[in-house]
Image (cartoon, rainbow, N blue to C red):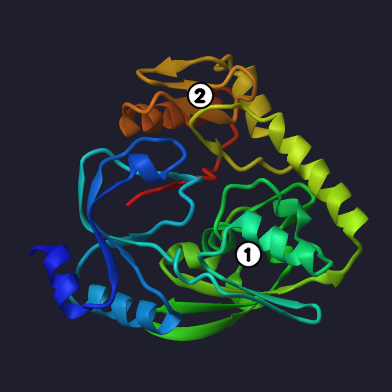
């Protein structure tokens, strides 16, 4: 089946893109090509699209900002579903709604302009609201789960509203990573003042400036309880370890950098780090990043 032609015929108004490059749309800069990328413009269109993909048994995956994912090399004979066009933003008192395609920067600017605080911890994180919700993105001081009140999503082709408890949030994980699409999020924010918002935003921006530069996925592993994944990897002597075009950062051992040549090199290095830490410390590291498709 020509997936691109099928979807264009079935959804003539749907924005589609043939031969979508994972390397060009992920921060790690590796990966192959998907047959098509699709960009629904509303929750209703997303629900109809996902129902058709399921019914026709067309493989698909979701992709937000592409910051915490590792695609595979080669051809993906399926569809990449992106919600970048679902980008509505509005506030009503201390309730803020953001569509899945809203970037972290746009969300922070929107809240700041209305003197609404509580989302400053997202400053500088490469993200869309949908992806950040699914992965419960955040930092030590706060995660999406701390501000989410409810989520609008699509499960098995049907629109559904999830309460915060329905989301089953935990450290860098949620129910949505099981294949449920996030299309919009309601956040609980608070009244603030410009000086306080600016001060907290600067703090988080400065913190992120100290992270390794280059093509990466951010932190690769979730920190075990009471431990640091980066410290464990460093203790195992893996700082600077390289496989092909992928190498563990000398600055922060929980970061893997890539020269953009091979997703397989990155995957093999992730597996090496996890295996070595398990063998030497007995601690099983859980991946924070998601492998696609």
Q: Which mark is residue 29?
A: none
Question: Quick one: label 2 or label 1, which is nearer the N terminus?
Answer: 1
Q: Residue at x 48, y 72 (%)?
A: 86
Within the image, what quadrant is residue 150 found in?
Answer: bottom right
Percent x, y of residue 198: 85, 51
Asked if labels 1 and 2 touch by Cβ distance under 8 angstroms, the answer is: no
Q: Residues within 10 Å of mark 2 (few under 14, many from 20)?
A: some
Q: How many marks?
A: 2
The quadrant where residue 31 appears: top left
Q: Position of residue 135 (x, y in %)?
A: 56, 57
Residue holding disc 1: 169
User: For residue 276, which numbered disc appears in the image?
Assistant: 2
Q: Is residue 42 found left or right of 134 in the rendered image?
A: left
Distance from disc 2 to disc 1, alpha carbons, whole Å, reads 29 Å
Q: Secondary structure at mark 2?
A: helix
Front label number (2 vs 1): 1
- Does any portion of residue 167 appear in the rendered image? yes
Q: Is residue 237 left or right of residue 266?
A: right
Q: Quadrant of the N terminus?
A: bottom left
Q: Is residue 155 left or right of residue 286?
A: left
Q: Residue at x 40, y 30 (%)?
A: 266
Q: As drawn, is 47 to the left or to the right of 234?
A: left
């Amino acid at each position: 089946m020509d997936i691109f032609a099928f979807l264009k015929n079935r959804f003539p108004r749907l924005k589609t893109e043939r031969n979508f490059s994972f390397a060009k749309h992920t921060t790690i800069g590796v990966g192959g090509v998907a047959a098509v990328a699709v960009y629904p413009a509303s929750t209703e269109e997303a629900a109809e699209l996902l129902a058709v993909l399921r019914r026709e048994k067309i493989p698909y995956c979701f992709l937000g900002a592409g910051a915490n994912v590792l695609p595979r090399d080669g051809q993906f004979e399926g569809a990449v579903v992106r919600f970048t066009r679902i980008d509505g933003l509005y506030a009503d008192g201390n309730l803020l709604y953001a569509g899945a395609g809203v970037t972290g920067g746009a969300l922070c600017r929107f809240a700041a302009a209305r003197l609404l605080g509580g989302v400053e911890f997202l400053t500088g994180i490469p993200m869309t609201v949908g992806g950040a919700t699914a992965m419960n993105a955040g930092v030590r001081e706060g995660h999406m789960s701390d501000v989410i009140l409810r989520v609008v999503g699509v499960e098995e082709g049907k629109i559904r509203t999830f309460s915060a408890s329905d989301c089953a949030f935990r450290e860098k994980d949620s129910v949505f990573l099981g294949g449920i699409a996030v299309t919009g999020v309601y956040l609980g924010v608070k009244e603030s003042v410009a000086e306080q918002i600016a001060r907290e935003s600067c703090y988080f921006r400065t913190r992120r400036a100290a992270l390794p530069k280059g093509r990466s996925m951010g932190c690769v592993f979730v920190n075990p309880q009471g431990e640091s994944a980066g410290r464990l990897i460093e203790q195992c002597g893996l700082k600077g370890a390289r496989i092909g075009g992928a190498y563990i950062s000398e600055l922060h051992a929980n970061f893997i950098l890539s020269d953009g040549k091979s997703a397989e090199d990155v995957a093999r290095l992730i597996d090496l780090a996890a295996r070595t830490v398990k063998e030497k410390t007995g601690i099983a590291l859980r991946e924070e990043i998601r492998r696609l498709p």
